[in-house]
Image: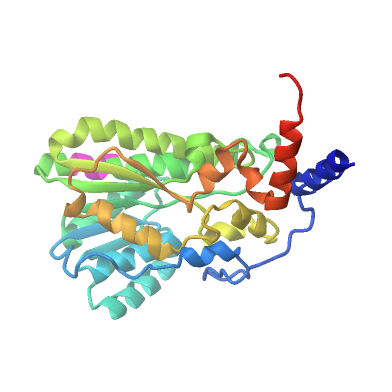
Amino acid sequence: MALHKGLIMLKRVFTPNKCCTRLFGNGTNTLYQSGPPHAKFFPVCDGVMLLPGTFKNKVAFITGGGTGLGKAMTTTLSSLGAECVIASRSLDVLQKTADEISQQTGNKVHAIRCNVRDPASVEAAVDQLVKDVGLPDVVINNAAGNFISPSEKLSPNAWKTITEIVLNGNAYVTLDIGKRLIKAEKGAAFLSITTIYAESGSGFVVPSAAAKSGVEKLCTSLAAEWSRYGMRFNVIQPGPIKTKGAFSRLDPAGVFEKKILDRVAVGRLGTPGEIANLAAYLCSDYASWVSGAIIRMDGGEYVSMAGEFNDLKQVTKEQWDMMEAMIRNTKGS
């Protein structure tokens, strides 16, 4: 009887909950009020952490800088003294963001139209960058594109669109600026933003997984080759961070947010400001000995999903006592 009762209890623990309640709206702010109790031990602390003036007299070029993580990283770098140049296809959005950040930080932010899929557009954007402020000291490749889809439904154009933005775009920007830096005998810090599934792969976002994995190999390869020219290359793999751009394409109905929250070990989503602080550190002189690093920042999501027995955290003390008794009564091997 006890054995039967114990098995029923375990079945309840490991049976997926079919009801997935929406926890968040579609805004850009991250909300945590419905997170697990232990999330209180991991409060958000995303104010600018580096010293004022850390990037004084330095130029930062950020692709995808108009919204989301790009906007957050630009705001942080600008507040630390950098003269920032943000680039993307939508000049209207860029200019609005540039004006907003300039007013907030007191430092000039420039906006340049750039389609990273087009080498000619990248070249023109970098020409404008050099003309306006000079060669950059910091380059952040943040432009991205992604959507969810069964792989059997992917068209060649869908594959091409994502890989051109993510992998080719990163390469075009990096190679164009890198060659100019070599010629000018000037060093710089490069940073690329990928994702935790660049390492593991993931179904339903196959073009993105393949492209971002390629970005990481591009960065680690150049970290080895171009260090002789004074360049560093690092990567951040963000976990789930609620921004309008990401969640509108990857969870348009908002049905997976609770499941995402449940598998993040610290019990909450990340914030753009937290990523921005890490990005600022990696691009600063404080990190001059950091190159070729791929840093996962995901609240423990990756390791939480990876461990085969991690779901045992759902077992209560009473259930553990019952299982221990069952195991002790097991005969033989």
Residue range (magenta): 175-180
- Please tell me which residue lies in front, 137 or 237: 237
Residue lying at 52% horizontally and 44% vertically, measured from the top left: 302
Residue lying at 13% horizontally and 64% vertically, measured from the top left: 57
View extreme (top): residue: 333
Q: How many marks?
A: 0
Is residue 178 rendered magenta in the image? Answer: yes
In terms of image quadrants, where is residue 268?
bottom right
* Residue 152 relative to residue 226: left or right: right
View extreme (bottom): residue: 103
Residue 115 spot, x, y in % from top left: 41, 52
User: Above or below — where is 128 with respect to 157?
Assistant: below
Residue 166 at least partly seen: yes
Residue 266 spot, x, y in % from top left: 51, 57
* Residue 106 relative to residue 149: left or right: left
- Please tell me which residue lies in front, 50 or 115: 50
- Please tell me which residue lies in front, 223 or 303: 303
- Please tell me which residue lies in front, 331 or 150: 331
In terms of image quadrants, where is residue 171?
top left
* Quadrant assignment for the N terminus: top right
* Residue 75 relative to residue 209: left or right: left
Residue 160 at least partly seen: no
Residue 148 spot, x, y in % from top left: 63, 47
